[in-house]
Amino acid sequence: MKLDKQTIAGLAEHLEAAELNVRDVTKITDDHPHMDWDDAYAIQDEIRRRKEARGQRSAGLKAGLTSFAKMKQMGVDTPVFGFVTDAMARPDGGEIRTSELIHPKVEAEICIVTKAPLRGPGCHAGDVLAATDFVLPAVEIIDSRYRDFKFDLKSVIADNTSAARFVAGSRMRAVDELDLRTLGVVLEKNGRIVAMAAGAAVLGHPLTAVAMLANHLGARGQHIPAGTFIMTGGVTEAIAVQAGDHVAARFQDLGTVSMRFV
Ligand code: OOG
Ligand code: MG
């Protein structure tokens, strides 16, 4: 760790204020070029603590920058991990208020819920398969607090990996009924196809992202508990949306997740 406790708390407050006031900020590594990975996750942990102190509950974990399309779009090469809370959840088919967001983008994600704890290091996709209760689809609405989505990995980790809203679908399937590599996803905006991919776009197999998350937590003395909802990361590049847009993500075997931006 390169930053002291007070600086970490100050940066968490700074980034949360940007979120709550719907105002973008410059990336924090501009002012703190020496901050390290532990500092970045410590800032994210402090943001989680602040949200929980205000009564929000953890609703799950997320992996991000796991697909080659997303890594290319954002110019990075390593996945990142974050969390979502109950306050970020929106119903399938519902409305998302853009006045609460800076510059939202949508991404289609294959998600799981675990039925057994997952502990790294040494966790692999097979362990994740054995610990998966069911698979479900979701759309994540990301909203980087950084101006023009311009960030580096440490800055985006501190900013809870741009987490803002998410909409989970209601069709769940057993993992052994699906081939998550060939599972197709079509993302539509206003009835037009804007992106498409198969599950293999996420690190070759979406459950690899969960194994990486378990290994990441294991290195920090934490684990993924049973019953955890986990988003494995956008399968395609993220698509910008604005008020008036209708988005539908059509997942092979998992149904459609839709929402309207108002
Ligand atoms: C970071 C969040 C990435 C995903 O699914 O790839 C993410 C960003 O692109 O702003 O959630
Ligand atoms: Mg995402």
Image: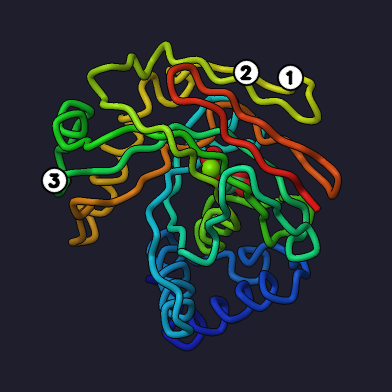
Residue type, label 3? Ala
Q: Earlier in the sequence, mark 1 or mark 3?
A: 3
Q: Which residue is mark 3?
A: 116
Q: Are marks 2 and 1 in contact (CB under 8 Å)?
A: yes
Q: Could you tell me how far apart the alpha carbons at marks 2 and 3 are, in whole angstroms?
A: 32 Å
Taking depth in this image into account, of 54 and 173 the one nearest to the observer is 173
The quarter of the image holding the N terminus is bottom left
Q: Residue at x 14, y 49 (%)?
A: 117
Task: Say which quarter of the image contains residue 131.
Answer: top left
Tell which tag, 2 or 1, sits nearer the viewer.
1
Task: Give x and y (percent) for residue 2.
Answer: 43, 72
Residue type, label 2? Met
Which label was assigned to residue 196? 2
Task: Give x and y (percent) for residue 102.
Answer: 77, 60
Q: Could you tell me how far apart the alpha carbons at marks 2 and 1 are, in whole angstroms?
A: 8 Å
Mark 2 nearby-residue class (10 Å; few <14, some 14–19, many ≥20)? some
Vertical placement of residue 155 versus 105, above or below: below
Q: Which residue is mark 1?
A: 193
